[in-house]
Image: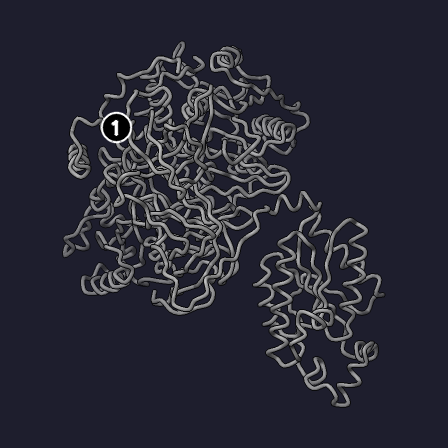
């Protein structure tokens, strides 16, 4: 700490951080236009920007489009939609704001969350004529889940209703009712026209009946963030350093205040240490630090906490966090495939990481009317309440808007963020319920690839009986082993001889057979293995379920041998038996076979068998070779 | 008024004697600083090997400073200068001086000759693309998993689309349309062979924040940023593609005063930004900062 410390300038007048506001709403309800108008009306445009917009609009043969201000990427402008969130600063009087623009297209939900999650207030733009639409409901739901406390509704394009009081009051009441269901308090509902500037920065002549604030007035009324310094102390350990023989416990204070001399509990193990020093570099020396500061602590005794351990007051039971291995959460689901019970993830909670399994899906949000209903899966971009089971007790504070605590994030084995999970509270185990605690592998996919020299994958061969699935699969297995790729074949008869010997050929049993095969394939693939499944699997729905169980590692291969060829070959004499009625419900004869519509690979029968083997082997190699 | 209210609430709810020291109320720079420290500590914990790109400009000096804040006065990973060999002599002198003063572990890399660069790019952009190639070579050579870079959202529209942790796929490409979600300070760290992550601790800072922080902390800068004979540099690139602006601001305080009234963009002096509408994005997708 050799450098001189500058102290004088710290006494300057306090300058507050800019207030982030997010603008959300259904596509084409006018978000980008609103931002352009806001910047223009508040004189926040850089020189040359306006000329750029005029030029861009002219080049595309359009009247001046405010939204071009934001569509800064070529690809976006050509498609006419905003792809990602951007941030634009603007100023109202002495107060600074940052606008986060979030896109309206539903496939871009994750970008919207990226932009919106830290906002202090939101403007929900609703087309006055169209009213709340699907994305209006979706975005409102999200505002609640990410905990945005101040919501202003802008009824845009009110000129289309001629600013008629009766009509606008009707739309306003509908929107208020919708948001009321989400327990969102609305700060103001402003009838406006972004294009013409009514009630944005200046009061409209066209809505003299309206006595509420303009948008700019409503924004200026958003209170500054509440202080977190008075709450019980919480600091999750971010890292532990040892520099020049001194150990530093580094982290950012989520709540409360810490002082030299405070006694702190460390994580779930409950060790206790005293704060010997609050350490900073090149800053005024203060024996105290408050919420929001990134600091380092020296502890006495000199314990070595783990990353993720929560530090909290040791001597005040009332100030302790919740502790539970089962946690109820709200969920917004960002993965492309649905979420099902039994899936395992890492739950990230500030800097902590916990292995968790989805123990139950308690309710799924119906986005038509925002009601909760029962469901056994959460669709992509869906919302739900779920219970997570961890392998050990987790210390946490339930989520509440405006605080950093309790903001769980689910991460898959590829270290990708697949969902946000604000924590509601501990979950009780229901009477007679079996507490299942599946565990997840701690070996990362990358490490497996390193160890094995190839990636994993499930190659699901479907086709009529006698189409050659098993033959091709076994030959590919051999060819792959010559390339040092470990492959396992799961074929129908082999499974039925053991794992599935209790099953017959009824539709239910066939379904169960496929379900088991898919789970075994999944387990093998998760261990890094290449799996070739050779099963008739005649129904589209069963194969779709297998794909869901296995996940994105699933590759459908259609062994497309026509019925006549299969029946002519009839290696096991099954077709003959089926024709004579000895086998009921035989696929292709007396039970349906639904050919795949768009398999990832098709092996046609009009080629020599060796070619099919080569094609399949090459296909697998292309996918699994790193 | 707000401040007084918050303070008195703290005192009443904790019920402790008023003689106890109270935490400072964080202003905007304190908040930006705390966030950047958090990001740098995440990068150091999660990405190894890690290196910080030190372009010798004001932003990267602030970044080195923030790293010293995060790690109690030292930078516990190497800093990297990818040299175009066309920088101003003042910049090389600055590099040598502060490598010693700040006890930095400096990795030096050089850029390939311009003849090896995509000839379809306009001339200044082609020159900038040399840097991308030089950087790519350094990332491969040192097998870097993490590269800390000082870009800011307010510099350029394409940079406004960035994540704090921005994964680069094989060939160092930026997939702008398929970026991972990033919220609640949780950063994605996907990994496959050949990937690395660009870490952007200054993403939320604005140009004026940088200058105010430089003033508050007393961070040294190359003096090309200060006016001589009515001209100064607002942004420093290669000598042949950076132009000075008209200015009389010869101290940090005067630069801040100038920026408070300025309405032109910071990169106005960078030739490549003006060559065609999509050139910056083309460069960035290929790995330019």
Where in the figure is residue A212, as x and y percent of width and height? 16, 52
Q: Is residue A470 left or right of residue B139?
A: right
Sort mark 1 into few (<14), some (14-19) or many (20+) by Cα contacts within 10 Å.
some
Point 60% across, 69% down: residue: A515
Point 25% across, 36% down: residue: A229
Point 49% across, 58% down: residue: A437
The part of the image, by quadrant, that contains residue B17 is top left
**Camera sees residue A50:** no
Residue A423 in the image: above or below residue B232: below
Which quarter of the figure is the N terminus of chain A placed in? top left
Q: Which SS class for mark 1?
A: loop
Point 66% across, 59% down: residue: A458
Where in the figure is residue A13, as x and y percent of width and height? 22, 25
Which quarter of the figure is the C terminus of chain A placed in? top right
Where in the figure is residue B196, as x and y percent of width and height? 58, 36
- Which one is in front, A40 or A448? A448
Residue A381 in the image: above or below residue A405: below
Which subunit holds the residue at mark 1?
B
**In the rendered image, which residue does mark 1 sit on?**
B24
**Camera sees residue B266:** yes
Q: Is residue A297 left or right of residue A557?
A: left
Q: Is residue A338 left or right of residue A384?
A: right
- Which one is in front, B2 or B178? B2
């Amino acid at each position: 700490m050799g450098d001189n410390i500058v102290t004088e300038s710290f006494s300057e007048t306090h300058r507050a951080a800019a207030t982030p506001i997010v603008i959300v709403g259904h596509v084409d309800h006018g978000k980008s236009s609103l931002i352009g108008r806001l910047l223009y009306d508040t004189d926040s445009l850089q020189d040359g920007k306006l000329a750029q917009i005029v030029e861009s609009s002219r080049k595309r043969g359009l009247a001046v489009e405010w939204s071009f201000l934001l569509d800064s990427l070529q690809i976006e402008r050509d498609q006419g939609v905003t792809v990602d969130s951007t941030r634009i600063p603007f100023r109202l009087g002495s107060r600074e704001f940052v606008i986060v623009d979030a896109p309206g297209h539903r496939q871009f939900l994750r970008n919207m969350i990226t932009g919106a999650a830290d906002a202090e207030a939101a403007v929900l733009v609703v087309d006055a004529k169209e009213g709340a639409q699907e994305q209006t409901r979706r975005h409102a739901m999200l505002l609640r889940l990410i905990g945005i406390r101040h919501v202003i509704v802008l009824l845009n394009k009110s000129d289309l209703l001629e600013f008629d009081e009766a009509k606008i009051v009707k739309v306003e009441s509908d929107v208020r009712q919708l948001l009321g269901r989400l327990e969102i308090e609305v700060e103001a509902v402003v009838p406006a026209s972004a294009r013409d500037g009514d009630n944005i920065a200046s009061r409209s002549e066209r809505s003299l009946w309206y006595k509420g604030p303009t948008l700019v007035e409503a924004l200026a009324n958003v209170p500054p963030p509440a202080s977190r310094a008075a709450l019980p102390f919480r600091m999750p350990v971010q890292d532990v350093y040892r520099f020049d023989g001194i150990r530093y416990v580094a982290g950012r204070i989520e709540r409360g205040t810490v002082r030299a001399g405070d006694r702190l509990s460390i994580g779930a193990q409950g060790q206790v240490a005293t704060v010997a020093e609050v350490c900073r570099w090149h800053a005024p020396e203060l024996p105290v630090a408050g919420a929001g500061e990134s600091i380092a602590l020296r502890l006495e005794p000199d314990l070595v906490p783990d990353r993720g351990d929560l530090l909290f007051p040791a001597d005040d039971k009332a100030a302790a966090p919740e502790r539970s291995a089962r946690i109820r959460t709200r969920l917004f689901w960002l993965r492309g495939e649905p979420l099902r019970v039994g899936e395992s993830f890492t739950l990230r909670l500030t800097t902590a990481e916990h292995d968790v399994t989805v123990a139950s899906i308690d309710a799924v949000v119906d986005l038509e009317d925002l009601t909760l209903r029962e469901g056994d899966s959460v669709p992509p971009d869906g919302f739900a309440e779920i219970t997570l089971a961890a392998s050990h007790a987790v210390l946490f504070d339930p989520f509440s808007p405006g605080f950093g605590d309790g903001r769980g994030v689910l991460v898959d084995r590829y270290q990708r963020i697949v969902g946000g999970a604000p924590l509601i509270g501990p979950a009780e185990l229901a009477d007679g319920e079996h507490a299942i605690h599946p565990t997840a592998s701690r070996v990362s996919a990358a490490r497996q690839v390193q160890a094995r020299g190839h990636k994993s994958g499930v190659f699901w061969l479907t086709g009529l009986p006698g189409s050659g699935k098993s033959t091709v699969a076994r030959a590919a297995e051999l060819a792959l082993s010559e390339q040092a790729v470990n492959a396992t074949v799961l074929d129908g008869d082999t499974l039925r001889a053991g794992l599935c010997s209790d099953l017959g050929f009824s539709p239910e049993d066939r379904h169960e057979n496929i379900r088991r095969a898919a789970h075994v394939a999944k387990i093998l693939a998760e261990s890094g293995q290449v799996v070739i499944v050779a099963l008739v699997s005649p129904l589209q729905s069963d194969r779709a379920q297998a794909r869901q169980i296995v996940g994105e590692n699933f590759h459908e291969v259609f062994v497309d041998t026509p019925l006549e060829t299969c029946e002519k070959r009839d290696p096991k004499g099954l077709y003959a038996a089926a024709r004579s009625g000895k086998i009921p419900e035989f696929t292709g004869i007396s039970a349906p076979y639904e050919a795949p519509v768009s398999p990832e690979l098709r092996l046609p029968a009009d080629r020599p068998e060796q070619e099919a083997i080569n094609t399949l082997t090459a296909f697998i190699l292309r996918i699994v070779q790193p | 008024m707000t401040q007084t209210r918050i303070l008195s609430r703290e005192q009443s709810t904790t019920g402790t004697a008023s003689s106890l020291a109270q935490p400072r109320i964080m202003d905007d720079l304190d908040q930006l600083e705390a966030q950047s420290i958090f990001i740098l500590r995440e990068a150091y914990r999660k990405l190894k090997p890690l290196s910080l790109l030190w372009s010798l400009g004001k932003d990267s000096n602030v970044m080195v400073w923030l790293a010293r804040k995060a790690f109690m006065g030292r930078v516990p990973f190497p800093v990297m200068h990818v040299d175009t060999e066309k920088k101003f002599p003042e910049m090389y002198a600055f590099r040598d001086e502060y490598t010693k003063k700040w006890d930095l572990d400096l990795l030096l890399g050089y850029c390939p000759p311009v003849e090896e660069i995509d000839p379809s790019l306009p001339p200044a952009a082609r020159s900038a693309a040399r840097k991308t190639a030089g950087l790519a070579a350094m990332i491969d050579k040192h097998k870097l998993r993490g590269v800390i870079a000082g870009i800011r959202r307010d510099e350029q529209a394409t940079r406004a689309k960035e994540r704090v942790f921005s994964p680069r796929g094989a060939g160092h490409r930026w997939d702008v349309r398929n970026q991972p979600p990033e919220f609640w300070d949780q950063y994605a760290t996907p990994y496959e062979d050949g990937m690395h992550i660009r870490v952007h601790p200054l993403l939320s800072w604005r140009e004026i924040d940088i200058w105010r922080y430089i003033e508050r902390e007393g961070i040294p800068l190359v003096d090309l940023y200060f006016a001589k004979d009515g001209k100064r540099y607002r942004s420093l690139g290669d000598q042949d593609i950076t132009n000075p602006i008209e200015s009389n601001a010869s101290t940090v305080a005067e630069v801040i005063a100038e920026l408070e009234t300025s309405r032109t963009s910071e990169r106005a002096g960078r030739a490549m930004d003006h060559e065609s509408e999509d050139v910056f994005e083309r460069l960035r997708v290929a790995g330019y900062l």
